[in-house]
Image: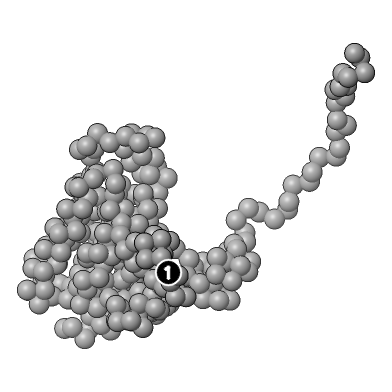
Amino acid sequence: MAWFKRSKKPKPMGPARPRSPVPEGLWVKCDGCREIIYSKELIKNLQICPKCGYHFRISAPERIELLLDDSQPRELFTQVLPTDPLKFKDTKPYKTRLKQYRDSSGANEAVRIVEGEIESSPVILAVMEYRFMGGSMGSVVGEKITRAAEEARRRNIPLVVVSASGGARMQEGALSLMQMAKISAALAQLRESRLPYLSILTDPTTGGVTASFAMLGDLNIAEPGALIGFAGPRVIEQTIGESLPEGFQRSEFLLQHGFLDMVVPRTDLKATVARCLRHFD
């Protein structure tokens, strides 16, 4: 029986694999053209691929710094924080998820409201943070954007909202869906006061956010290549049983079919928004 026994000889230890001299994070692969980009060059170019123009996603603080004259403006409604009204639990309790996203993103919720100026034009600016639960719209997001519209109306200045969201937050159920009507009502009051509302759609803007405030702007502006829609392309294909046209739900496709007013590269976004605000004066 000794013939059938395996001998467990230790494998000879080879030379240790030398560590790469290249620091981690020095190079980035572009999701558009798959080319390798020097990370410092990418940062210098506002997170846009210099080879194909692909727009990488950026955080809310980076977006605020890009748009406003003051890179550290006063933030509003910081005291509005999420709770767990449904005591929701999937693989983790909702409260645990909230804490994890606060720690990883450095944000308290999926939107930040600030007051500032864009090329000397005063605005209330709401910027969604995709790193916080995919920018999902819960009760706090709805409340803060509603308050932003009310504050813009009170101060008689324009409202600018930058969307980046996967849609309504499932952990808050119907309370999330109610925010669609709530924000839309506040925007209707803003329009009655004849105050401009500019909606900027970035990658991705989907679900209940697209179905409400993201598409209600006096001007709807998108970044190039942004995914914008309600349901995802795969769900639509399975529902209608047909293949979708190339570029479906991308900003250029939506512009061509009348859903957007303009598609603006990130490098020109601030100047374009400022010009639009001056036009509304």
Residue hosting label 1: 242
Q: Seen in the image, is 188 located left or right of residue 212?
A: left
Quarter of the picture containing the C terminus is: bottom left
Relative to residue 252, is residue 153 depicted above or below? above
Residue 131: give x, y in percent of width and height.
40, 53
Residue furthest toward the right? 3
Nearest the viewer among 251 and 48 is: 251
Nearest the viewer among 238 and 157 is: 238
Relative to residue 53, is residue 152 depicted above or below? above
Residue 59: give x, y in percent of width and height.
40, 59
Q: Quadrant of residue 196?
A: bottom left
Q: In which quarter of the image is residue 38?
A: bottom right
Q: Seen in the image, is 125 located left or right of residue 25?
A: left
Q: Quadrant of residue 26?
A: bottom right
Query: Alpha-carbon neighbours of circle 1 within 10 Å: few (<14), some, or many (≥20)?
Result: few
Residue at screen point 26% across, 59% down: 208
Quarter of the picture containing the N terminus is: top right
Residue at screen point 24% across, 53% down: 141
Relative to residue 275, is residue 161 depicted above or below? above
Residue furthest toward the top? 1
Identified by mark 1, the residue type is: Glu
Residue at screen point 14% across, 67% down: 187
Secondary structure under badge 1?
loop
Nearest the viewer among 39 and 11 is: 11
Q: Seen in the image, is 272 located left or right of residue 173?
A: right
Residue 63: give x, y in percent of width and height.
37, 65
Residue 49: give x, y in percent of width and height.
54, 72
Nearest the viewer among 20 and 233 is: 233
